[in-house]
Amino acid sequence: MALLDTSGRRASVSSASAQPETRATSKLAQKLELNGFTRRDFLKYCGCLAGMMGLSQLAAPQVAEALEIGAEGGKLLPVIWLEGSSCTGCTEALTQGTTPDIPQLVLETIALNYSETLSAAAGHSLEEARRETIEAGSYLVVYEGAVVTAYDGNILRVADEKGTDVLLETVKNAEAVIALGSCACDGGWMAVRPDDADAMGVQKFLSEHNVDVPVVNIPCCPANPEWLTSVILEYVLTGHLPELNDKNEPAALFSQTIHDNCPRRGHFENGEFVYQFGSEEEAKGYCLYPLGCKGPQTYAPCAVTRWNRSLSWCVEAGAPCAGCATINPMNPQANWVDENTPFLERHRDFAVGPITFQPTTVAVGLTVLVVAVLGVHCAGMKLAGRMDGGADFEPERRWDEKHGGPEAHEAGARAQRLYDDLDEMGLEPKNTGLHRKRDAAARKAAAKEAPQAADSNNDTHAEGGDE
């Protein structure tokens, strides 16, 4: 296993070396015992870490040994924890109130050299610890919160420096940066429209400043501390970062949807859903999909690791998944808050520039438009006299009447005779529209011409008789 000795150099330690002595003198073991954790609890936790790293749970003793040796030496791998624009929710998830858990004890003991929230030191002494860690090199940076760039980075200042400058200075010798929480991944809550703070995630910010340092995104609001611990330990044990997906998330952790492992999945398959809070279906623990649960499209292991010492998580506590693990690192304007709100509606809002609307609004608008067009069309058909009997009967196309040859005219004449015969027999009545009106007008014109022709003939006969 690759570790760091007390001087900060990597050393090779066999899985069996100094194990009894380490167990007897480990500061980490003492702290765990003082906080009510047994050796069995610790090994179980190490087995979970091994599983999250893609290792067999048989590797739990090796993980435990690496943690204990690092705790005894005091320098397993230095970590600088920076706070961007955040609510410190990810730190709160790590500390879990006043009762520390194993992830907190592990990180505090073996790695956390600098944290603006958790460190006992403050002021100049704390900043000095950060700079000394940077100069020594071989450290990881954990960044919590969004990178806010408005007002040339002066919207957030740390120790009388621009927050953006602090981030760029801190990552220059880092081996990797872990963007912890959705705000650090793509701006999260801080980048919600209209994003007056010009907030973004760490990956996008470093990319815009041409900083070539690996970035690992661990989303959720807040992120689970066990995911952070597993990434750090995998780097320590294997010497490289975990395999990442196209969003720079640990692929082993974020490869399945919440829906895949949800304890309410059986109710979904049976078509048993909750449609209203406080209902009998909710009391029975039915699926929350109709109430806006985004579990089917959200990739995260929340249902497996859970929170607060694995006691519970959102859906188990009765709340639909809000999809806070959905990130878009290079596009803060497509963060999970904008993408998934309103949280308790089945469909998310669509956005066209500053305008947001629900798909149902679009559906109603299109329905009204179609009905209006059909109404206008029907009115036009009525005014044109094409409602009774359908369209006008045309034995020959108008184009053929003007441009067709003898064969087309003959075919039209045959069709005319056929339909005239059928019309007379009542088998295929022709429409009563323009065609019949045209015939009526022709008959009327013929009737007017007949008397004139008769009068003309009578005048001719009279003149002949006089002669």
Image (cartoon, rainbow, N blue to C red):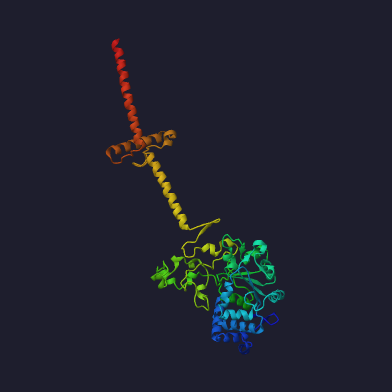
Left or right placement of residue 269 versus residue 113 in this view:
left
Residue 258 against residue 462 in the figure, above or below:
below
Residue 122 against residue 420 in the figure, above or below:
below
Picture quarter containing residue 265? bottom left
**Residue 55 visible within the image:** no
Left or right placement of residue 139 versus residue 344 in this view:
right
Left or right placement of residue 196 versus residue 442 in this view:
right
Residue nearest the viewer, comparing 400 with 391: 391
Q: Residue at x 49, y 72 (%)?
A: 314
Question: Where's residue 16, x and y in %?
Answer: 62, 87
Label tally: 0
Q: Residue at x 31, y 36 (%)?
A: 420
Question: Where's residue 69, x and y in %?
Answer: 64, 84
Residue nearest the viewer, comparing 435 with 73: 73
Residue nearest the viewer, comparing 53 with 338: 338
Q: Residue at x 31, y 19 (%)?
A: 455
Residue 175 against residue 196 in the figure, above or below:
below
Q: Quadrant of the N terminus?
A: bottom right
Picture quarter containing residue 464? top left
Q: Residue furthest left?
A: 425
